[in-house]
Image (tube, rainbow, N blue to C red):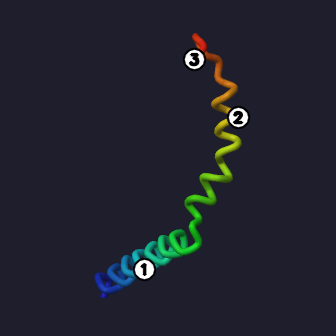
């Protein structure tokens, strides 16, 4: 009985992860997150001191 309960929990977790990845793909959330993080990342990168000019 405990084996079936563990398998059911694993199945539910896998289905939830699959649904999450489908939602990320469907709404293009990965690109939106990267676009939102681009300005702070560029601000940080531009503020780094360099040894030489490019």
- Which picture quadrant has residue 6? bottom left
Give the mark nearest the N terminus, 2 or 1: 1
Q: Position of residue 36 (x, y in %)?
A: 68, 52
The quarter of the image holding the N terminus is: bottom left
From what the image shows, is residue 9 above or below residue 35?
A: below
Whole-angstrom CA distance, mark 3 to mark 2, is 18 Å
From what the image shows, is residue 4 above or below residue 29?
A: below
From what the image shows, is residue 40 above or below residue 47?
A: below
Q: Which mark is residue 43?
A: 2
The quarter of the image holding the C terminus is: top right
Q: Position of residue 43 (x, y in %)?
A: 70, 34
Quick one: SS at disc 2? helix
Q: Which mark is residue 54?
A: 3
Q: Position of residue 40 (x, y in %)?
A: 70, 41
Give the mark nearest the N terminus, 3 or 2: 2
Left or right: where does residue 2 sit relative to residue 46?
left
The residue where tag 1 is placed is 15
- Is disc 1 surrounded by few (<14), some (14 to 19) or many (20+) residues within 10 Å? few
Quick one: SS at disc 1? helix
- Is disc 3 surrounded by few (<14), some (14 to 19) or many (20+) residues within 10 Å? few
Whole-angstrom CA distance, mark 3 to mark 1, is 49 Å
Whole-angstrom CA distance, mark 2 to mark 1, is 39 Å
- Which picture quadrant has residue 50? top right
């Amino acid at each position: 009985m405990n084996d079936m309960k563990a398998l059911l929990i694993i199945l539910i977790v896998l289905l939830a992860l699959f649904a999450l990845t489908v939602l990320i793909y469907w709404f293009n959330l990965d690109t939106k997150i990267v676009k939102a993080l681009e300005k702070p990342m560029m601000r940080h990168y531009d503020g780094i001191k360099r040894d030489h000019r490019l």
